[in-house]
Image (cartoon, rainbow, N blue to C red):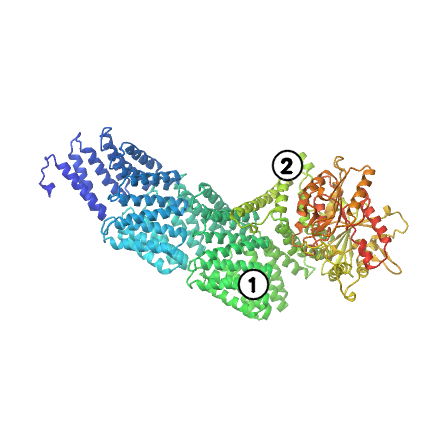
Amino acid sequence: MVVERTPACDVSLPAILNNLGNTFARRFDHTGDLGDLAEAISLQTKALELTHEGNTDIPSMLVNLGGSLMSRFERMGNQTDIAESISLRTRAIGLVPEGHTELPGMLTNLGSSYLCRFKRMGNLADISESISLQTRALGLTPEEHPDLPAMLVNLGGSYMRQFERTGDLGDIAESISLRTRAIGLTPDGHADLPTMLTGLGNSHLCRFERTGDLADIAESITLKTRAVGLTPEGHADLPGRLMNLGGSYLRRFERTGNLADVAESISLQTRTIRLTPEGHAYLPGMVMNLGNSYASRFERTGDLEDIAESISLRTRAVGLTPEGHADLPGRLMNLGGSYRCRFERTGNLADVGESISLQTRAISLTPKGHAYLPGRLTSLGISYTHRFEQTGDLADIAESISLQTRAVGLTPEGHAGLPWRLMNLGGSHLCRFERTGNLADVAESISLRIRAVGLTPEGHKDLPRRLMSLGNSYHRQFQRMGDLADVAESISLLTRAVGLTPVGHADLPTLLISLGGSYIDRFERTGNLLDVNEAISTQSQAVDLAPIDHANRPGYLNNLGISFRLRFRLTHDPSDLSEAISAQIHSVDLTPESHASLPRMLSNLANSHLCRFEDSGNLDDVTEAIAVLTRAVGLAPEGHALLPGWHANLGNAYTKRFARTSNPEDITEAIANLRQAARLTPEMHSGMPTILNMFGAAWYQYYKSSGDQCHMEEAISNHKSAATCVLGAPKVRLRGATQWARLCSRNCDSPEVLTAFGIAMDLLMLIAGLEETVQHRYAIIEAYGRLPVEAASVAIILGAPHTALEWLEQGRCLVWGQQSRLHTPLDQLKVHNMPLAKRIVEVSRLLEGLGSSRQHSSNVESFAEKVTLEAEALQHSQLASEWNCLFEQVRELPGFDRFLRPLRCPNLLQHLPRSGPVVVLNIHKFRCDAIVLRAGSDELQHIPLPDFTLDKAKLYQRMLGIQLRCHGLRDEGLYQAVEHGTGRVAGPYRRKAEDVITVHSILKSLWHEVVKPILNLLEFSKGDGIAMHLLPRIWWCPTGPLSFLPLHAAGVYRGEGAENIADYAVSSYTPTVTALAERVKNDSPIDERASGLFLTCQPEVPHFDAIHGTKGEVREIHNEATIQGVRSSLLEGDAVTPDRCLEYMEEYSSIHLACHGFQDTSDPLQSRFLFHKGRLHLSAIMQKNLPNADLAYLSACQTSAGQETLANEVVHLAGGMLAAGYLWRTRPEGSGSRFDGSLSAYALHYATQELRGRYDNTDHSLLAWMPFVHYGY
């Protein structure tokens, strides 16, 4: 009205127009009506046009018009508006002289325009300019100026925005400092104080989101609560302050999972909306925020009413937002996010379809160059990924990767959002890998996530989650490739993530579950009990930490049940299986029928019932398993990625029931489900070998019932396919190869039987590699120890003794052979490639140390120690991988193609001792055979031993143990598992004589059924009257329980025709033919500086009986050696420690130990010699590289007893000496003997015969000299 009455020539008209324009601008701030803003800009523009150059009001008019244009930019996003705003305000500053009172305010306003453009476009130059301008304004403002607090607040806001972009903690610290100072300058009761408190609360919230420090979020809530308290009811700013406070409660809830916080957030935000009138410009944003809180609570509780409310609220917010509004794309993205959340819970494809539609529309409304465009592209990509996980449609995952790759490309280096986008892109590559098995995808996933972790600073609140994601990528690569280095990396990363996550953090249960999953997968690969124990520990902790009503609790229980079931398969502890079923029933009961994860949980519960059926034979369990699996398959949508596995499990359950009931309907259902599983499984999928093995088992059960050879052929075909799959866990493929071989061996005419056993042997080598500790390699071998002798038996039946010998050499003494290779001389390689040889030496030493001494992380409590131990495990796996790569490099060199490969039969025959044959004895339930090798012969001699059986060998082994105890003698450790008491079995063992086979009978049977038939075919003559040194030598290389029987003492010792092996030959033992051949091949003189003998006796160990005669024994030998001119050193008792003894072993070529020995059957590497001042462990001896080692004389108990369950391995104290480089002999305590290293076998033969001549031929007398055994060359 005033404007209309004011003449155009009136000098006051520009001011009137400007003021009216400002009024329209203020009304726009309240209503959001673009008509008001357009009117404001029109009036302010006209006012400016009517104002003459030089008018002092022009600068303020320019500032006001610039402010209105900035508001329109914030609403509409038109870059022309913000560019014009900056231009006008820059011009205004140019018109104001230095020192002008309005200059600081103008600088601040121009800074606000740059800040506004930065928030939309993300250009760091803009925020830098904003801070520079506001800092200059602050510098021009005196301390007492009333505008100073507001300037401090604004500058603090710019630093906060820069922090959000860069993540630099210095920026947010400066923001908090500036805003704290502003509040300090503002008196209580000031109208701006609540706004300042809210701003400072936002800065603390921002720092909390970066660091996760609960003190910051608590301070944010305190400050914002104070701001709300200072704001009277009806105040226009009260709704906004309530909304801000609700936001802080929501963020704390997301950190802690405390439902009271999200309830408070919802309450505050609901009150906000109630106070905000319809049509208010801020109402859509407030409704959207309340929808966010409901969505967050849904993710915690899984309550579908919450996500429905979130969708409803967000739909309303979108409906209230006019077309063209700058916030419309963001609100569409959020609404799409709620639909995606509901899809994750229900699996309803319509929801994820709506999510994709909404987010696609949002992106179409987002201009190029917009700061939020990369984040929106990533979110849309995530929605495509979720749909792909349900449908398996490769077009969806390709689109996801394309969108996210574009997002990463649009994100500048240094942007705080870059790590998050890299992490998500890596997740989509990982999803595609799981569907296609393309290794390039998992490699890209790992690469992207490594980069993301590298960009995340220490202390960042998201670092644990990113470490978890990277660990999951390594975990999946391990599942596909079986490389233990990958799962070690996964466990190391996840352990670090857990260690960085404080108790009470909402993410901690998820991190613990992921860590447990990696331990479980390593357990399934290696069978290491410590891994499954640690998995159960971490997963139990996760369940305990998860609130009763947490949406993820059913999943946690399900995973814990799986771990208990897997441990049961190893330990057969029924309580584990009960725990598994209980946890999984609870998991299923807590999961709604519509939940997308229910089929997976049902399948796992069924597997536990099936496991109990296999243990107990109760048909109710397998019937329940079938019912539960049928329900799971029925609930799974077509195309679900896990459906093939559920069909396979259902088929397997039907197979198990058919094996029990022979109901033909069961086997028909089994084959139908397994065929469907195979059909639905993509080619090159790592799970295919498991399905094929199940298929093979089903056809075999069908064959057993039908006798139809076609069914047998199907069984063989499927097991063969499982064994020969390129992918899949080696243990699963080994199972397939073993079954393939065994089914073929039923028909010895099968041309595939040798091929099948050959593949099985190669896979056995693979699962017991150097990446495992020595102790665990022994555990693996214990499970598969019969395979080499079984394969050799079949090869012998088929007339392939050369193959039989190679398999025995390959599969027996596996760990000993691996340890020996770590000590292999590399003289020839050094000539060709010195750096390569040096690195092999370095890696071998590191591998030996880690393999022998590394602890499992389950042995410690603190996560800091666990992180250290898992880092060692990772280093161990990486070194094992490098070791294999180094070998490949060496084998590419001319003349090194067989470098450290198992020797082939022709190579073994080239390097045999000329003083006698080597006799390899193989015993299996099928048969017993000897294979004879002779120097100078290219042929092997096969000698069947039909009268000796595996059952006899086991019986004689057990009876000898009883005899030793009956006579009050040492048991040699076979029945003693712990070190206590006297170090020997306490007192004689009494048993009725008629229950025990005599020693005479055992030696007589060995003579007639094993040794004499061999000597006859060797044409050995009895050496009556000839000189002892003219007797031929014979090296025994037994397998299985024959390794515990005294072949060197076999004979008839009573009556007419008494004779024994000592009448024909001098006996020695060798763990493998390879060990002997390598010794012959690499025989070299001892360094004169090391030649000599070190002796020690340790007769009086605390808590053990004294060993009588040892001092005299070692002193006599030492004196004789000195007289003979032998370099000799003697230390007794306290004069030498175990560590110092190891040093003497390096300084002297031969050693004599007279002490207690202890065979630890629970952990062979902890077997030990007992010194006055400690323990000399087998593990420490095996780590020594002793190039001059010659002879070790072990005058100790339990030195060559071995471990019954590892009959084909060298796991006794004498074996440790061999692994360290010695070729030795052993005996129990005695009164002394001569030292002569060069003729040790003959010397021992002579000494035992002399000793035998002093006794009669009772069992007790035979046992007095039988323990004298010679090992080596």
Q: Earlier in the sequence, mark 2 or mark 1?
A: 1
Residue positioned most to the right: 1025
Q: Is residue 430 above or below residue 601?
A: above
Element type where label 1 sits in the image: helix
Q: Nearer the viewer, residue 1018 or 521?
A: 521
Q: Which residue is mark 2?
A: 838
Would residue 903 be visible to someone looking at this image? Answer: no
Query: Residue at point 20% right, 43% down?
Result: 25
Q: Which residue is mark 1?
A: 575
- Residue 77 placed where, x, y %? 28, 43
Q: Is residue 355 above or below residue 1121?
A: below
Q: Nearer the viewer, residue 1083 or 908?
A: 1083
Q: Nearer the viewer, residue 372 or 590?
A: 590
Q: Residues within 10 Å of mark 2 (few under 14, many from 20)?
A: some
Residue positioned most to the top: 98
Q: Can you say which quadrant of the picture contains the N terminus?
A: top left
Element type where label 2 sits in the image: helix
- Residue 141 placed where, x, y %? 26, 33
Would residue 316 be visible to someone looking at this image? Answer: yes
Question: Which of the two discs, 2 and 1, sits closer to the camera?
Answer: 1
- Residue 101 placed where, x, y %? 22, 32
Q: Can you say which quadrant of the picture contains the C terminus?
A: top right
- Total numbered labels: 2
* Amino acid at the residue labelled 2: Lys
For the residues labelled 2 and 1, the Cα–Cα distance comes to 52 Å
